[in-house]
Image: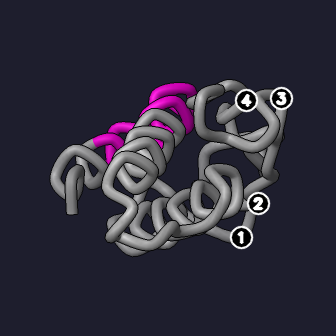
Amino acid sequence: MKPILPTAITALILCGAAPAFAADPQAAVTVRYGDLNTTAPAGAAALLQRIDQATLVLCGGRPDVRAIAEFQRFQACRAAARGRAVGELGQPMLAALANHTAGR
């Protein structure tokens, strides 16, 4: 039996993830995951990938790596946004996968 979970991370829990870098500190991205079984490794991996893609949008897109300070702010924004989204969902499989892949 599939547990009852919200089918979207409305606002992806990313609002204000990194106001110094995000174009709009109140920006929000919706990630839908009702089609995934997030208690299974494959479902958790798919959701984490969707969260990671949403952080790219929220944090303004990948800057040129030669702009070191800007790139560091972008990476910090993505890490904070990812951490908030994963933390708010409170799903052990997703959290374990996120911890295992952090910093990659």
User: In x, y percent, where is residue 26?
Assistant: 83, 29
Please name the amino acid that badge 2 sits on: Arg
Residue under pointer 2: 32
Where the C terminus falls, by quadrant?
Answer: bottom left
User: In the rendered structure, are the residues bearing label 2 and label 1 in contact, judged by CB atoms less than 8 Å apart?
Assistant: yes
Q: Secondary structure at mark 3?
A: loop
Residue 94 shows up from this direction: no
Q: Are marks 3 and 2 in contact (CB under 8 Å)?
A: no
Name the front one of labels 3 and 1.
Answer: 3
Crowd tier of the residue under label 2, counting other residues whose Cα lies within 10 Å: few below 14, some 14–19, many 20 or above: some
Kind of element beneath mark 4? loop
Q: Name which of mark 2 and mark 4 comes first in the sequence.
A: 4
Tell me which amino acid carries mark 4: Cys
User: Which amino acid type is marked by label 3?
Assistant: Gln
Mark 3 touching mark 4, by CB under 8 A? yes
| Mark nearer the N terminus (3 vs 4) | 4
Which mark sits nearer the N-terminus, 3 or 1? 3
Q: In this rendering, would 77 be left or right of 12?
A: left
Residue holding disc 1: 35
Q: Which residues are magenta?
A: 82-95
Q: Which residue is mark 4?
A: 15
The image quarter containing residue 61 is bottom right
* Mark in front: 3 vs 2: 3
